[in-house]
Image (cartoon, rainbow, N blue to C red):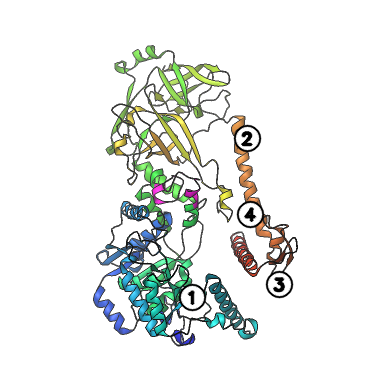
Amino acid sequence: MTAKDNKPAAAAETTVTSNALAARELEWAVNPPSLLEEHRKTNGSIIRTRFPPEPNGYLHIGHAKSMNFNFSLAFEKLGVAPENRRTIFRYDDTNPEAETEEYIDSLRRDLEWLGWTPECTTHSSDNFQALYDLAVQLIKKGLAYVCDMTKDEMVAQRDLAKRRSNARHVGKDPDAEAPLDPALLPGRNRDTSAERNLRLFENMRMGMYDEGTYTLRLKMDFESANPNMYDLVAYRIKYAPHPHAGKGWCIYPAYDWTHGICDSLERIDYSCCTLEFETRREPYYWILWALDMYRPNVYEMSRLNIEYTVLSKRRLIKLVDKNHVRGWDDPRMPTISGLRRRGYTKDILNNFCNDLGATRAENLIEIEKLYHTARLNLGATSRRAMAALDPIKVMITNFEEEKTKARDGSMTFEVQNSPTDESLGSHTVTLTSTIYIDSSDFRLVDSSVYYGLAPSKAVGIKYHGGNLFCDEVVKEGDKIVELKCHLDNSEGRKKPKSFITWVPSDAIPCEVRVYGHIFTVKEPTDRWEEEISPDSELIHAKALVDPSVREVVDKKYVNKWHSNCALQFERIGYFVVDTDTKFDSESNTGDLVFNRTVSLKEEVFKKELTAEEIAAMDQRKAKAKKANAEKEERMKIDPMDFFKLAAEFKGKYSQYNEKTGVPTHLADGTELTKSAIKKLAKELDKHRKQQAKYKAANK
């Protein structure tokens, strides 16, 4: 067969609208009547999707959207009755060097925690023998061959095929623009015999060759406009044990060879993925066409992009490996484990994904949408408690006198755990002669727009109902160590403009971690490591929380795979018990740690900042402003001048290609190698794409 023979005649593309999940059609995708009938007999009224993550890291919020789509939204769009819905959870485990038991276990636990129940759990590696046998079939058909080309040779081969395709696309003669080099196209391996390829492939399977010496490639179509049709690699040699399949294999199938075949073997009806896989549609269907296997429907949707976040697995791994975060479950991470540790429940994440829906339009989701969903959920379900993140000691000088005036001589008050849901019960808080308030509720210098406590000023004190008047400020140097105040519960007292929260003298010491954006810019760039915020985690090591929560924050209830106790610290925000907690409620010992999930909608008033804090804030703002300005200036650079003006390239080169602007010589006159020029050309192409995206977003 020639390259042209390896595709069906007149592979016309059509657009269909009769199906809610219809996308670009190919003739390869059309199932013959016999396969359709066989599929219908097997599946009956069942419609089946699949969720196939690769176990090379932890699942993130983008996977949560994919799960929501494959387990629920896809069926809703198709109008499938609940009893006919099935979804397979498949580990796409074809790369043993990147996969671990830790990742495998985390994927299963996260899926279960989010509440999805698969029809069954499978592994691509369960089909290794079937995949191998099917590869042998293609070799016998003359549609696959063993190749000994090096990586660089393959790159050159693909580049030549692409240049010839580009010439045809603009109506030019490919033989003039990119003459054939028989050493590359078709190359020394493509037209070899089936007998030779069967022998070499078996030798690969038996471990007779070194890694990188041979691959099995598919005999596809070098004249296609889609580079993914340029004889993809189906198998490569890897001497690595597999975490699920064990040590029985030393050749492993590639993603493109594996996932379509597994879809067909598992009787998938709809294979749903994100838009970056849209160009893999051709090889997906070509492989199934060549093997005469059932072809599922393929639907691509836009991937999830959220402000101040990266979802690239490569970048997430780097965040962990370079200790920018505490680990995969760091509350700043967009992983499901990280979000759970930060206090996001399965209902929050599933509701967020439901609200997003699924479209083919690329967009950037505002992080505030996630926060809003969290507040709606936590506001209705979280128990209330009082806390002081940065406590100031308050001595109530007339406490005993006021206590005798109180009903039954008691300063203990019953408080509803939720002001809107009586079913959540209640707890008690006791006012003591010494209390602690948060430093954000006190200022040395009062102002007309400030409603907190200040010298010679009164505020309301929550649940007691009376006024707290500041008589004296005790300082050690510049540090406030104590406020001496008195209570005023008289009938004629001036009505306060605000009521502040407090914790009693037996408050529980705790550490409170307040989290912000991990990046300083909304859309992290290729220089994302420079855009990591140094202030994404602020730790209040000496915080206090009222003792009414003692029982519910005990370490025995803490579990990294479950949602831990969530509380609303009144007037501060929503918080969750962290997995670092070792607190024992019986002995009242051990570390108690909280993470802030999200702030309240509105903060009543903010802490007066010191000169140092203002300077630090200004510095952070200036850094963020500089990063955004640099990005804006970078996007203005004409591609022809990119290597002359971009900061990282400026002054490095002396001569440039007149047509493309790609450097050809270093500053000292040394001529660049072809490989170096090609790498720079890719860098320029990336700049063009980023510039086009930037201009489109800023019209």
Looking at the rendered structure, the kind of residue marked 4 is: Lys
Which quadrant would the C terminus be assigned to in this image?
bottom right
Which label lies toward us, 3 or 1?
1
Which mark is drawn over residue 631? 4
Viewer can see residue 493: no
Q: Earlier in the sequence, mark 3 or mark 4?
A: 4
Q: Are marks 3 and 2 in contact (CB under 8 Å)?
A: no
**Magenta stretch?**
318-339
The residue pinned by badge 2 equals 615
Which mark is drawn over residue 3? none
Looking at the rendered structure, the kind of residue marked 2 is: Ala
Q: Residue 619 placed where, x, y %? A: 63, 39
Which mark is drawn over residue 659? 3
Reply yes or no: does residue 693 show up in magenta: no
The residue pinned by badge 1 equals 148
Residue located 53% across and 31% down the image: 607
